[in-house]
Amino acid sequence: MGIRNSCRYAIACPTSMGLRITPEDRMAVQNSARFYLQATSAESNVLNIASSLGRECLVLTRFVAESPMADLIRRQLRARNIRFEGQSVPQGGPWGYRHQFNIADSGFGLRAPRVWNDRAGEVGRTLSAEDFDLERIFGEEGVEILHLSGLIAAMSESTTRCCVEIARVAKAHGTLVSFDLNYRATFWKGREAELHAAFHELASLADILIGNEEDFQLCLGFAGPETGGEALSSKIERFQTMILQVRETYPNARMFATTLRQVLSANAHLWGAILLADGQWYAEPPRQIDVLDRIGGGDGFSGGLLYGVLNGWEPEKCLQFGWASGVLAASSLNDYAEPADEKQIWDIYAGNARVQR
């Protein structure tokens, strides 16, 4: 897969940055008094593998002017080696704009994790392509991969237009486009026809498509049996059958990937992944992994996969690195993976948890 040369940015993404608060010590939200705060978004989480390993990445977003929460987000992005561009929008009084809150607990044993999204007045819903000098970013400075998520693409009419316009410019300048479908029913309610059309265009522009079987059915309209609690082997077969149909509809795409997860408990999952690249299938059979916090595992997988693409690795190696990057994310209370170096990821893949001295 051809990567554009001499680019300033490895990966860029439009996103709505928010704040995640998680109870300490795996407690439940309703009976906790102490919470851990972090700046987060699904899209910026994907960038974190490449940014942690020394590649410059870029977030395109909006901030609330004079907000200490916006300042916290900027500070944390800087600490993660992620650059950012975005207008600062006046709050407009106590009932105006703000950065969204994601309130989540990690669960424990057979007590499942729970997530509540508090997004009223979210400033990221106003994101517009006109906020950015796209010709400078993609034409002059250069971006190797544009990563899009179905979350920001479906968040509002404004963000939908923003993602489509950015993808068009990126594609025109030879940037690879990665699109994680990430279906959310609450975002789609009442906008199904509009979003089907937008997601079809984004998928048509994409070089890399990421999503499970349900994502392809609900976002792009592919027919398929209802998903259920069947064995992972059945899910793999169904995914392969569907992706062969998807490839015919979106011939521009060269990679199709998804993770495979079976929950044994909040602390233990079976974790695998599957990839179709240039007509050949690659699979990471599910292995049992220990889970500290499951949120962000899929983003870690996508980030690791894209890091492999950036380096020109063979598809099998990209899939392995993505699988292990997802494991690293699940081993952290942050919802993004922060590898110390490539070796840490490869040790995870090899199952080498011996102390490093």
Image: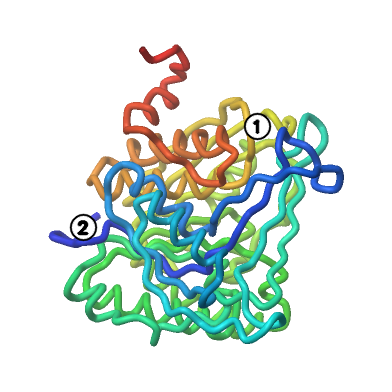
Q: Nearer the viewer, residue 204 or 241?
A: 204
Residue sticking out furthest to the left: 6
The picture places residue 336, in percent across and down from the top left corner, at 50, 46
For the residue carrying disc 2, how many other residues have a C-alpha within 10 Å: few (<14), some (14-19), or many (20+)?
A: few
- Kindly identify which residue carries mark 1: 269
Query: Residue at (67%, 58%) from the top-left corner?
Result: 102
The picture places residue 44, in percent across and down from the top left corner, at 46, 57
Q: Amino acid at mark 1?
A: His
Which element is circle 1 on? strand
Residue 210 shown left or right of residue 310 in the figure: right
Image quadrant of residue 209?
bottom left
Quadrant, the C terminus = top left
- Kindly identify which residue carries mark 2: 2
Q: Is residue 201 above or below residue 284?
A: below
Colour mapping used in the image: rainbow
Q: Amino acid at mark 2?
A: Gly
Q: Is residue 244 above or below residue 339?
A: below
- Label drawn at residue 52: none
Residue 14 shown left or right of residue 312 in the figure: right
Image quadrant of residue 110?
top right
Q: How many marks?
A: 2
Q: Nearer the viewer, residue 268 or 14?
A: 14
Query: Residue at (47%, 33%) from the top-left corner?
Result: 284
The picture places residue 290, in percent across and down from the top left corner, at 62, 26
Q: Nearer the viewer, residue 274 or 52?
A: 52
Query: Residue at (54%, 56%) from the top-left corner?
Result: 40
Q: Is residue 114 above or below residue 139?
A: above
Label 2–label 1 contact, CB within 8 A: no
Quadrant, the N terminus = bottom left
Kindly report which numbered mark, 2 or 1, lies closer to the viewer in this rendering.
1
Which element is circle 2 on? loop
3D distance between C-alphas at marks 2 and 1: 35 Å
